[in-house]
Amino acid sequence: MNVLHDVLTVFSTYSAIPVPSADIQKGSSPRVPAYLPLVGLAVALAFIGASRLLYPFGQVLRGAALVIVPVLVTGGIHMDGFLDVCDALSSWQSKEKRLDILKDVHVGAFAVIRSSLYFIALMGLYAESSHTIALPLACGFILSRCAAMVMLCTLPNARGEGMLFSFQYNIDAKTVLASAAVSAAIVCGLALITAPLPAALAIVAELMALWRFRRLATTKFGGITGDLAGYCIQMQELVWAIVIIAVWRIT
């Protein structure tokens, strides 16, 4: 029953998928983040299904739909974090001011500009892809959440409050890291089997991007927040898509 409770909690928090909401207390279990890859799996399955369903249609429609599907599944919760972090980084203010900007409900111009560039780039990439590489592409949705789980367990909370802190303050780090490691190993194996060279280079790129994110979170914010975790997930997914599709097209 505790497992079911934790799964329902993670889906109710990090997805727009309707789940029973009775007696779900966010952050009540130290193992809740361990089930985050399941949300990534839901996104991946929706992405693969949409890719195959839209195969007969044109590239533009297919690319636009594949951008929209993950947002519909998650409700855009991670993109919200991406927007806030873009505004904070573009402010060139102190660490404390950047953290205040993350809490601001208003959307700044730089967030709009960068999110527009993000979606345009992603749409162009997906338009250049094919349903034949939908599986290795979809692996990125799970791997990105594994990366965020590692950051959640290894970085301090920058604010000491908020939704992420409710999960983090009593987190079962060993269980969450084990879940991230097993999930990442499985999806990396699937990606390497279905697209060896693109996946191998994408894994290297993901590790580099994660190292860069860790430095950014530490130096610019003093740790991690929910918004930064969302930013991490979105950037990991973008890097994965860029490398997988670019290498697949070239080779």
Image (cartoon, grey):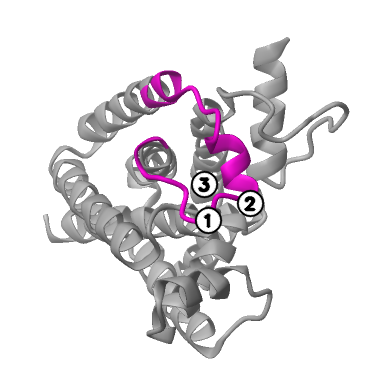
Residue 114 % position (x, y): 44, 80
Q: Is 87 located above or below residue 49 in the figure?
A: below
Between marks 1 and 3 in the image, the one whose residue lies nearer the viewer: 1
Q: Is residue 135 magenta?
A: no
Between marks 3 and 2 in the image, the one whose residue lies nearer the viewer: 2
Q: Amino acid at mark 3?
A: Phe
Residue found at x 25% / y 58%: 215
Residue lying furthest bottom: 109
Residue found at x 63% / y 39%: 166
Category of crowding for the residue at label 3, using alpha-carbon neighbours closer than 10 angstroms: few (below 14), some (14–19), many (at least 20)? many
* Secondary structure category for the residue under label 1: loop
Give the quarter of the image for residue 23.
top right
Identify the residue position indicated by label 1 in the image: 159
* Contact flag, marks 1 and 2 (Cβ < 8 Å): yes
Q: How many dots with numbers?
A: 3
Front residue (pair 22, 194): 22
Residue 203 % position (x, y): 20, 43
Category of crowding for the residue at label 2, using alpha-carbon neighbours closer than 10 angstroms: few (below 14), some (14–19), many (at least 20)? few
Identify the residue position indicated by label 3 in the image: 47
Residue 129 visible? The answer is: no
